[in-house]
Image (cartoon, grey):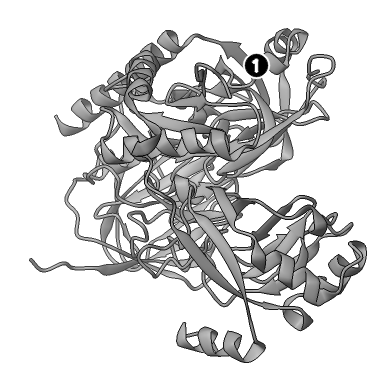
């Protein structure tokens, strides 16, 4: 962790505040602490704040403020914030139908790691994952906490179309595709939950800084939830 | 209050890539939703001002090969930005000026003379549903515009009720030009410390816009930019800002634009916001040179550009 955050210019409207150099839950706590503080008590001229693995990206209006003023405010605020100021993260449960047509690579992931498919599901559902940040596609979570026993390389040739809701593994990462898109992750299951639904309020299901757990459901339960979502 | 929406255009032929855009979608970047919006914000804002719209109303962003539009209702339009050869019923349509249109008129584009993107505003604004506070088309997220996609043959667009009058124009000395070699000003960082000699190189030589250039980003081609010896060439994924210049391991820079949220490559510099429109007006084959400015200078340039816009507004409303 950096003793003093690093302030890096991201153009004339962006300031990147970096709290550490690695992916680490403790560094991310600092990120979450300052992010929540700014959400609760805005800084004048700050238009948008994005939490990331190890930094926050601050967008500001240069007609109202500048990077020096923001830097000063962040340092002041950080000095006053104590760890007890961080509300405990919420945990969201994501139902997943594993294997078969929903997870065409489940067998591969099992075989690659010397496990049975049931053991892969058991390991994948027993961990709690930290949602470090969202992005890449709307609502796509960058998760931390995948068990080493499930690490599996990406596909050599990405699929042209991965359906939204697909749950996959790529090396040391696990994640959920939020929209239909091309992709190279090994797919082990699919959730009927919609991570991104522009017609819903809020449109994005997850929030950075919270925890996520996967829960195994049957194909029948998948269909039931999908139908209640209005999908056929 | 009654709101009258009339159908104003039928898309006879959509052109290469025509989308509905406004100033952008703000407040959702932390959820992975990019701002989108007009790439050349200045031209878009002037287009709105010319037809008497309030700022932020939706317009059409036209790319290289313009569309053919059939006019369905009387109204007022303005075309700004790059000169893609606009025609009204086969006569040259004056740009940077408000022009009255009548049902049965046809607007089409002859071909690129300069620049890359035109903006067509219509008095009352293009009326499509706002999603997350914006009408901007975001293709990957399937929102904004018409069903979140570029326009296609047969689409019909509505407009709101507008004011404004025909024949209002921008003073000639305030109309931007779009040369095929542009100088774009940058602030170094956020990852300039991954480079040393590479920075000098980046600032000294021009880069050519490749065929891979769209609203997500512009891939450039040139003499490769070298990272420092022994440093990682990728970083922990982090959000990108419009104008961020990524240097992947092959040394060919990519200018990130308005439909990108996260990147994992080192960013040597960031194009200053008043110059993003210059990037958006560069097309395949054009040359871009980078010039370093410090942040104070960038803010002065931004303020001067805003003053230019204010004097255009003044000239229009006189």
Residue furthest out toward the front = A84
The residue depicted at 16 percent of the width and 51 percent of the height is B163
Is residue B168 at all visible to an observer of this figure?
yes
Q: Nearer the viewer, residue B140 or B13?
A: B140
Total of numbered circles in the picture?
1
Q: Nearer the viewer, residue B297 or A112?
A: A112
Which residue in the structure is indicated by mark 1? B192
Q: B143 left or right of A141? A: left
Q: Residues within 10 Å of mark 1 (few under 14, many from 20)?
A: some
Quarter containing the N terminus of chain A:
top right
Q: In the displayed structure, would residue A127 be above or below residue B62?
A: below
Is residue B281 at all visible to an observer of this figure?
no
Quarter containing the C terminus of chain A:
bottom right
Q: In the displayed structure, would residue B223 be above or below residue A109?
A: above
The residue depicted at 65 percent of the width and 59 percent of the height is A175
Q: In the displayed structure, would residue B80 be above or below residue B311?
A: below
The residue depicted at 54 percent of the width and 67 percent of the height is B152
Q: In the displayed structure, would residue B25 be above or below residue A98?
A: above
- SS label for mark 1: helix
Q: Nearer the viewer, residue A140 or B64?
A: A140
The x and y percentages for residue A70 are: 35, 20
Q: B318 left or right of B180? A: left
The x and y percentages for residue B131 are: 37, 61
The residue depicted at 81 percent of the width and 18 percent of the height is B226
Q: B98 left or right of A165? A: left
User: Label 1 marks which chain's residue?
Assistant: B
The x and y percentages for residue A56 are: 48, 33
């Amino acid at each position: 962790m950096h003793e003093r955050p690093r302030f890096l210019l991201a153009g004339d409207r962006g300031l990147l505040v970096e709290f550490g150099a690695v992916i680490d839950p403790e560094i991310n706590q600092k990120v979450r602490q300052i992010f929540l503080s700014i959400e609760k008590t805005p800084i004048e001229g700050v238009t948008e704040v994005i939490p990331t693995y190890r930094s926050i990206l601050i967008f500001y209006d240069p007609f109202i403020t500048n990077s020096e003023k923001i830097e000063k405010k962040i340092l002041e605020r950080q000095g006053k914030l104590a760890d007890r100021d961080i509300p405990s993260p919420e945990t969201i449960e994501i139902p997943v139908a594993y294997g078969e047509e929903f997870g065409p690579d489940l067998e591969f992931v099992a075989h690659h790691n010397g496990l049975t498919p049931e053991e892969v599901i058991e390991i994948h559902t027993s961990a709690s994952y930290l949602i470090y940040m969202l992005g890449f596609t709307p609502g796509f979570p960058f998760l931390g906490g995948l068990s080493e026993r499930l690490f599996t390389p990406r596909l050599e040739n990405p699929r042209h179309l991965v359906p939204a809701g697909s749950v996959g593994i790529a090396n040391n990462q696990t994640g959920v595709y939020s929209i239909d898109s091309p992709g190279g992750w090994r797919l082990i299951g699919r959730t009927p939950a919609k991570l991104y639904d522009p017609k819903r309020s809020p449109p994005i299901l997850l929030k950075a800084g919270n925890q996520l757990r996967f829960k195994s459901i049957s194909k029948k339960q998948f269909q039931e939830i999908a139908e209640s979502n209005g999908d056929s | 209050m009654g709101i009258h929406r009339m159908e104003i255009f039928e898309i006879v032929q959509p052109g290469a890539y025509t989308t509905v855009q406004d100033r952008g979608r703000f407040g959702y970047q932390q959820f992975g939703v990019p701002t989108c919006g007009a790439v050349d914000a200045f031209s878009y804002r002037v287009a709105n001002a010319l037809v008497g719209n309030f700022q932020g109303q939706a317009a059409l962003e036209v790319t290289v090969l313009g569309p053919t539009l059939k006019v369905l209702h009387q109204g007022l339009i303005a075309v700004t930005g790059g000169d893609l050869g606009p025609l009204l019923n086969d006569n040259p349509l004056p740009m940077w000026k408000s022009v009255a249109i009548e049902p049965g008129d046809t607007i089409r584009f002859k071909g690129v003379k300069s620049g890359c993107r035109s903006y067509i505003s219509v008095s009352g604004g293009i009326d499509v549903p706002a999603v997350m506070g914006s009408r901007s088309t975001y293709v990957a997220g399937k929102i904004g515009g018409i069903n979140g996609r570029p326009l296609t043959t047969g689409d019909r667009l509505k407009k709101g009720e507008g004011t404004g009058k025909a024949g209002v124009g921008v003073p000639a000395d305030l109309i931007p030009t779009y040369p095929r070699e542009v100088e774009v000003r940058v602030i170094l960082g956020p990852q300039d410390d991954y480079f040393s000699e590479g920075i000098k190189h980046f600032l000294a030589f021009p880069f050519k816009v490749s065929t891979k250039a769209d609203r997500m980003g512009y891939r450039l081609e040139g003499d490769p930019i070298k990272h420092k010896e022994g440093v990682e060439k990728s970083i922990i994924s982090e959000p990108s800002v419009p104008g961020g210049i990524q240097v992947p391991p092959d040394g060919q820079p990519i200018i990130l634009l308005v439909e990108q949220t996260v990147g994992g490559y080192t960013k040597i510099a960031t194009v200053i916001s008043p110059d993003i429109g210059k990037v958006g007006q560069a097309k395949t084959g054009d040359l871009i040179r980078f010039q370093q400015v410090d942040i104070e200078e960038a803010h002065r340039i931004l303020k001067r550009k805003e003053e230019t816009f204010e004097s255009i507004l003044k000239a229009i409303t006189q």
